[in-house]
Image (cartoon, rainbow, N blue to C red):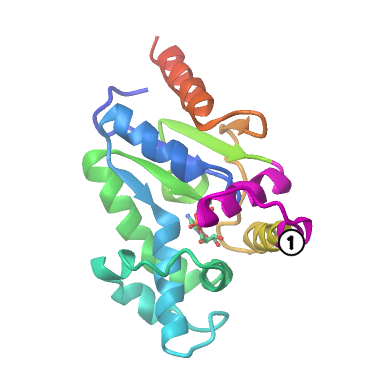
Amino acid sequence: MTGSRRLIIAVDGPAAAGKGTLAKALAERLALPYLDTGLLYRAVARRVLDHGEDPVLQGEQHAKAIEPADLERDDLRVPEVDRAASLVARQPAVREALLERQRSVGRVHGAVVDGRDIGTVVFPDADLKLFITASPEVRAQRRYRQRHGEDCQDAELLAQEVAAIVARDEQDASREVSPLKPADNAVQILTDHMDAESVLDRVLTLLQERRA
Ligand code: CDP
């Protein structure tokens, strides 16, 4: 493991597992940039939907044309974009168009990078690879809380959220290019019974152990 300059930490895992929360906190602690690669796929999907195009087929031109303002829109984390992002992400040309953009950020400054294929494809030589997961039920409740600011008390609504999350995971894990899967040397953390702080502590301990 290198010093903290240009350190690359890959944080992969399924939808709503808490990757973003962990990656952001880790980046702050280590004074590294935080890169949310899901936002890139979301921005491509948003543009495709806004143009009335099909996210199964269209996306490459938008992936090449992404601008900073596309990443700052407040309508990227809505259910229709969840679904469309996962569909554009299946297209090899979209992934290819976004690859260099992701690598260039990490190469210069190091980064904590949150995504699906960071440890396997984007930064296969990352200093630390994490695969963060939780059961679909726990993830559905976390996603609901994130979007509505409170726990979901409605079993039917929660079941719909679980179904959407499971469908997206299947779509992400079954694609031919860069499927969602843990890298061979990833440390897997199941966070069902851990709050955000415990996950962060666990990873900081892991980093210390590796440095020692
Ligand atoms: O926040 P959440 O975990 O729900 O999703 P996200 O990380 O914002 O990613 C949205 C979608 O982008 C995922 O469902 C993937 O299909 C795709 N994605 C990907 O294919 N590769 C990445 N490195 C990051 C996201």
**In the displayed structure, does residue 190 sit left or right of residue 121?**
right
Q: Residue at x 45, y 41 (%)?
A: 21
The quarter of the picture where the C terminus appears is top left
Q: Give the residue at the far bottom of this rendering.
A: 52
189 part of magenta stretch: no
Q: Give the residue at the far top of this rendering.
A: 212
Residue 46: image quadrant is bottom left
The quarter of the picture where the N terminus appears is top left
Q: Is 207 placed above or below 27 here?
A: above
Give x and y (percent) for residue 63. Answer: 37, 73
Q: Residue at x 46, y 74 (%)?
A: 45
* In-front residue for pair 211/142: 142
- Circle 1 crowding by C-alpha within 10 Å: few under 14, some 14–19, many from 20: some
150 part of magenta stretch: yes
Q: Is 153 placed above or below 64 here?
A: above
Looking at the image, can residue 125 be seen? no
**In the displayed structure, does residue 136 sit left or right of residue 209?**
right
Residue 8: image quadrant is top left
Q: Is 142 placed above or below 6 here?
A: below
Element at badge 1? helix
Q: Is 188 placed above or below 143 here?
A: above
* In-front residue for pair 117/79: 79
Give x and y (percent) for residue 205. Answer: 46, 16
Give x and y (percent) for residue 200. Answer: 46, 27
What's drawn in magenta, residue-wise?
135-160
On the image, numbered disc 1 is attached to which residue? 163
Task: Name the amino acid, label 1.
Answer: Ala
* In-front residue for pair 41/201: 201
Give x and y (percent) for residue 104. Answer: 27, 52
Q: Residue at x 25, y 69 (%)?
A: 69
